[in-house]
Image (tube, helix red, strand yellow):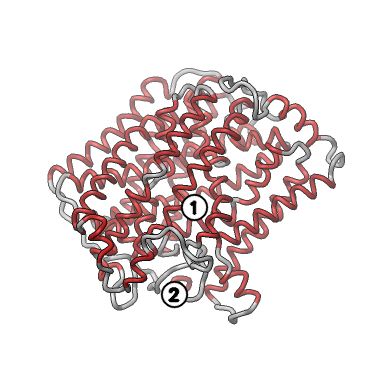
Amino acid sequence: ETLLEHTSCGHTAGGIAACSTPSTPGRQDTCVMPVTLEAIDITLIALYFVGMAAVGIIFWARGGGDGGGQDEAESFFLAGRSMRWPAVGLSLFVSNVGSEHLLGLAGSASATGVACAYFEWSAALHLLLLGWLFAPVYLRCGIATLPEYLGRRYGPRLRRWLSLISLVLYLLTKLSVSIYSAATVLTSVFGWPRWIAAAGLVGLTACYTAVGGLAAVIVTDVAQSVVMLVGAVTMTAVGFGRVGGMSGLRSEPPPSLTSEEWSRFFHIYKPPDDPSFPTLGMLLGQHVAGVWYWCLDQAIVQRVLSTRTVHHAKASCLLAGFLKITPMFLMAYPGIIARKLFDAELYPANGIATPNQAFPLLLQHTLPPGLLGLNLAAAVAACMSSLDSVFTAAASLFCLDLYRGWLRPAASPHEVVRVGQAFCALLAVLTLLWLPIIDVLSDQIFLYKEAVMAYLAPPIVSVYLLGVLWRRANATGAAASFAVGYTLGFGRMAGEVWCKLHPPRPGSAADALFVRLHFLYAGLLLCLACLATHAAVSWAAQGADGGEGRAVDETLLAKCSCGGEGGRRAAPAPKDP
């Protein structure tokens, strides 16, 4: 509550505590009154939930609990490495475009305009990097998790570190943001208690993920992508119809904005000192978090690891890259439409703004029966597609890297699958226990998520990028990069929150480092520091690490180079001793 009291529109340049307007302690957004659904809306939502539950049951009946040996674990965690590019491409898209996009992009666009869509367009570049640089290396190495590559490249210590860090990041960012977004929509539209809405979504997603594994997740992602895209297209079309098309949208500004301010809503470019989305910062610093998210995060890359060949992996990345063009038009513009139609509700005269209510307001006031149910199903699909990605990735990291790779190396594949299913249930409970903390987030959850990634992704980007591209990078340098990067990253986060609670003197060092310095610029500086540390320590420690780093270099890079035949996959290597 103390943090929320200080979340006012001061001189902050953007970060985990950034906010555009004052907030009230413990505030629950209440500008949307619950709606009464028609029979057709209830029918569409019920059909969606029945369909998702049926997928889990079908995959469980087809062998979710039978079989044995290595094939059982590989089938559960990697869908038997048999997926084709259309399904994987759609799964990549919906795994990223979750409820935080439907709610968060619309909310940020209602506050600042279309500049937030740059994050979506830049993803196409990162997907090309995944398909043409990282995926060939991963697939030829035959790895099942990304920390496994780190372990084979630098040694088992780094593998365990990354697995633990990734699990913490999933809980603090991806799970919390997805649940917060979906629960906000369901609470606003239906009037349900947030705990009930969150528990239902988490429980159903964990169930079909636990019993069906990655294959069930990818199949449901295909269906969810169709539901989500159709829902977003219909809501965008209805919204443009309400405001008279693009010309009507741009003609007159909302009462709270001047004509000049409103015109800037439709420009991607923002000045370097913009508090939310400076273009220079996005061009330089956003790619740090983007490379981690798309190329180095188990929740996303696990889909690519399940493909048949490198060719299928590249094609799936191309498909997902083209689909990432659509969020600007289907998610950001609806937020601007909401600002035009509901300016008084989103930004009332009392100063308590609720930009996260842009999407729920559109649902309630613009959609007729039938389309309302379709879009509610789309919002639920977006949330569940993000959650199932994290559940499967977290189960893979815990079971393959920590449980079998460290705690119980002699565990059978059947036991590993059972532990993965139990871990999905545990993660669901932890997510619900984290729910009260979500209210402390910024009123623009999209900015919160990007800021946390900018602070915590640089060490991971450093160790993978140099590990793939530079033979001299070794385990000593990677460990030093982790130590420096996370000391600085968590320090930046702590300093930012402290300065929000206790504003520093303008012009002081604390003001410059933790308030004025935008998170995108901070993320770039952190990444450069990690790369420099990794390179310098690796160079100085050549031959001083017992030969471990060099031995891994020669055997791994000879086998897993970026060149060569694109259609082949290497057999999985033995796990770390």
Question: Does 161 appear above or below 334?
Answer: above
Residue 175, percent from left and from top: 45, 49
Marker disc for residue 4: none
**For residue 417, side relative to residue 478 (left or right):** left
Write the residue at 38% across / 25% down. 60
Residue 138 seen in render: yes
Please, which residue is most extreme toward the bottom here?
505
**For residue 408, side relative to residue 261 (left or right):** right
Write the residue at 73% across / 38% down. 154
Write the residue at 36% across / 32% down. 222
> Dot 1 corresponds to which residue?
173
Between the residue at mark 2 and the residue at mark 1, the CA separation in whole angstroms equals 22 Å
Residue 402 seen in render: no
Query: Looking at the image, is mark 2 or mark 1 earlier in the sequence?
Result: 2
Mark 2 crowdedness (10 Å alpha carbons): few <14, some 14-19, many ≥20: some
Residue 557, percent from left and from top: 72, 29
Quarter of the image for residue 554 reads: top right
Tell me the quadrant of the picture where the N terminus can be found. Answer: bottom left
Amino acid carrying label 1: it is Thr
Amino acid carrying label 2: it is Ser
Residue 438, percent from left and from top: 43, 59
Question: Does 237 appear above or below 16?
Answer: above
Q: Secondary structure beneath disc 2?
A: loop
Residue 88, percent from left and from top: 44, 31
Question: Does 572 appear above or below 41?
Answer: above
Tell me the quadrant of the picture where the C terminus can be found. Answer: top right
Mark 1 crowdedness (10 Å alpha carbons): few <14, some 14-19, many ≥20: some
> Dot 2 corresponds to which residue?
8
**For residue 18, side relative to residue 37 (left or right):** right
